[in-house]
Amino acid sequence: MSSETASKPVFRDLQADDPDPETTEISSLCFNCGEDGVTRLLLTKIPFYKEIILMSFECEHCGFKNNEVQSGDKIQEKGTLIQCSISSAQDLNRQVIKSDYATVKFPEIDFEIPPQSKRGEITTVEGILSRCIASLEQDQPVRKALDPDNAEKIEAFIQVLIETKSLKKTFTIVIDDPSGNSFVENLNAPLVDPALSTSNYERSKEQDHLVGIYEEELKEIKEEDETEDGDDKDRPSDSLADEVLHFGTNCPSCNAPCETNMKVTSIPYFKEVIIMATNCDGCGLRTNEVKSGSGISEKGVKITLRITDPIDISRDVLKSETCSMSIPELDFEVGAGTLGGKFTTLEGLLGAMKEQLTGHNPLVCGDSATTSVKERMRQFNEKLDDIINGKTFGVHIILDDPAGNSYLQNVYAPEADPEMEIVYYERNFEHNEELGLNDMKLEGYEDTTE
């Protein structure tokens, strides 16, 4: 394989006039006649939506043909839980991207739609309800003939769904997607939508298996506390501090092979962190991610900075993956996990946030966005640019991290910063639940039960 071929993105944009779509042909068994047929694969991207795999099978012996579409979406690092209150016709018309792995629930009527045959779709809240009604009504004539009692119960539930769709009363739609690739339209984008909440969570082992992630069971490794020759005592504790580690991975954007660099470093007046950077020669993507090297702190931290000078934008900032960020003056807030962990400047963080808003959610930008949403995005980006370029002062940047692993540079250190307020707080049950601490055994964990 040439270097030119290897550097091309695996999933290319879907274009009708693409002269070289790069299909792959594989000899496959025909289940109709038992002879060998040909399967053709095309890996492509639907603009502003998702990566898909188009498969076409044809057998020249019996003429059997079959076409299939499968999702090629990359699995996000965390699952996504979306809750939205539906109280108006505008809410019913919210656009929804439901991935192959998403479960849809309507708590008020105790109704749940499990992942269906690995099919993702772009629809609306009303569309989901309409499809459920149509699906139940389709088999009613047969049910009435074979099982009248059950048919009567289903007919009653169909009426419940119809009343729900007609907004007899407010209801809630909940989308639980362990792959993290589902979205519900924010009607106030890019501002906060009071009826919509999105949170990220760590997948369970069962959910990892659901999305196709399997980890080998690691054998228990016991390390001795001391060695006979005392080599461990002479070994520097910061042996990794000056070393950059390299390991192969796939690009999170185009899935082409690339390399990730990792380094352990210490932030003055803070703590030790692990920085990972990935550069892709295929599509040019550059990412960096930061993870704490010291675990979860005893308390959460809330950092508030008032921008009073252009130099404030150049302050170093460490935003962990558990940290949310808000700008009250813009009525703007991004939840934990939106940008992942980042070690950059405040200017770089705001720039990354802007890029995420304009490219990550296809319901906010791209073909799926309405004219009004695009106009609001334009106005918001102008205000954000004024902050980034040092033209707007008096706004507040708030970082709230229940794990206590976020940091904003104090330019007056070790003295107090008059424009920055740092508050440490006790985590509540919900914070500990999101961090997975409620299920941890912190005392007596060394005890074993036969």
Image (spheres, rainbow, N blue to C red):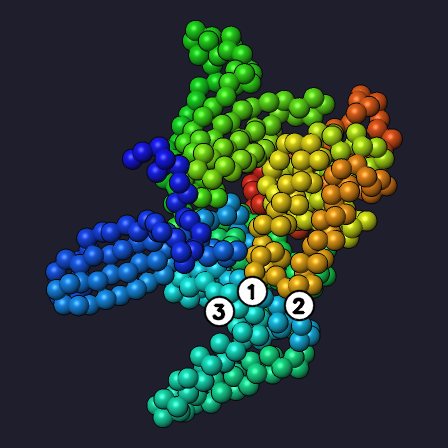
Q: Which residue is mark 3?
A: 113
- The correct choice, above or below, for 6 with respect to 148 in the image is above
* C-alpha gap between disc 1 and disc 3: 14 Å
Across and down, in percent, residue 123 comes to 53, 68
* C-alpha gap between disc 2 and disc 3: 17 Å
Across and down, in percent, residue 445 comes to 52, 36
Among the 4 quarters of the image, the one containing residue 409? top right
Specify whether residue 219 is in view: yes
Q: Nearer the viewer, mark 1 or mark 3?
A: 1
Specify whether residue 427 is in view: no
Disc 1 secondary structure class: strand
Among the 4 quarters of the image, the one containing residue 196? bottom right
- The correct choice, above or below, for 116 with respect to 446 in the image is below
Q: Which residue is mark 2?
A: 85
Q: Residue at x 49, y 55 (%)?
A: 47
- The correct choice, above or below, for 370 with respect to 73 in the image is below
- The correct choice, above or below, for 359 with respect to 240 in the image is below
Residue type, label 2: Ser
Q: Residue at x 74, y 48 (%)?
A: 382
Please rate how many residues cluster around mark 3, counting C-alpha atoms within 10 Å: few if below 14, some from 14 to 19, many from 20: few
Q: Sequence-wise, which precedes: disc 1 or disc 3?
A: 1
Please rate how many residues cluster around mark 1, counting C-alpha atoms within 10 Å: few if below 14, some from 14 to 19, many from 20: many
Q: Are marks 2 and 3 in contact (CB under 8 Å)?
A: no
Quadrant placement of the C terminus: top left
Q: Which residue is mark 1?
A: 96
Q: Are marks 2 and 1 in contact (CB under 8 Å)?
A: no
**360 or 164: nearer the eye?**
360
Q: Sequence-wise, which precedes: disc 2 or disc 1?
A: 2
* C-alpha gap between disc 2 and disc 1: 14 Å
Disc 3 secondary structure class: strand
Residue type, label 1: Val
